[in-house]
Amino acid sequence: MTIILSGSGTFNTPYHLEFKDDPYVKQIVLINYDFMYDKLPPFLENFNSQLAKLSFYKLEVLVMRDLSNVVQWIEKANRTMFNHYHIKACLYLIENQFFEPETGVFKQKRKSFPLESIFFEAFPEMYSSLLSYIRAR
């Protein structure tokens, strides 16, 4: 199940997961209603507060810290809520490119990269390169 965040990661429009009005997000509670009903809303509120801090326009050290906090928050939810039901939440960075070649047919190219702490720890220089790429875009 793919859930898209809104916002552009700036001060005026930080990243945000709309879980109060989005019926698609509300369906997560149906995994196990009795267990998730009172645990999922606080998790999502705190997740949104972590996302609100995330901006790729900050200093690289701060971006890495904020991104690491978001990833750790998701992994904590996996351990405490989702893994019990054989579900794993993962945050992806996705870039969509749209172009129209000479044939006049619209094409889309998507690049995605999973953000997990195992990658943060194993390849810290790769995340530095990734942040530079994001800032350039």
Image (spheres, grey):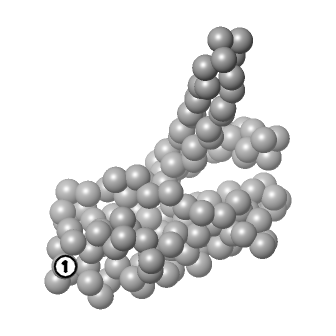
Side of 3 where 27 appears, left or right: left
Q: State the count of labels.
A: 1
Q: Nearer the viewer, residue 115 or 23?
A: 23
Residue 69 seen in this snapshot: no
Side of 119 where 55 appears, left or right: right
Q: Nearer the viewer, residue 77 or 23?
A: 23
Figure quadrant of the C terminus: top right
| Crowd class of label 1 (few under 14; some 14 to 19; many from 20; radius 10 Å) | few
**Helix, strand or loop status at disc 1:** helix
Q: Splitting the image into 4 quarters, where does residue 98 fall?
A: top right
Q: Residue at x 69, y 26 (%)?
A: 99
Is 33 drawn above or below residue 51 in the view shown?
below
Q: For the view shown, which residue lies furthest in the bottom direction?
A: 38
Is 118 drawn above or below residue 82 in the view shown?
above
Q: Residue at x 27, y 65 (%)?
A: 82
Q: Splitting the image into 4 quarters, where does residue 49 fall?
A: bottom right
Q: Looking at the picture, how far across and down is residue 25, in whole percent?
A: 38, 68
Is 1 drawn above or below residue 112 in the view shown?
below
Q: Looking at the picture, how far across and down is residue 115, in whole percent?
A: 52, 49
Q: Residue at x 49, y 81 (%)?
A: 45
Residue 110 seen in this snapshot: yes
- Find disc 1 in the rendering and name its residue: 33
Q: For the view shown, which residue lies furthest in the top direction?
A: 103
Q: Looking at the picture, how far across and down is residue 17, in whole percent?
A: 52, 69
Q: Amino acid at mark 1?
A: Tyr
Q: For the view shown, which residue lies furthest in the front direction?
A: 104
Q: Residue at x 65, y 11 (%)?
A: 103
Side of 34 where 65 appears, left or right: right
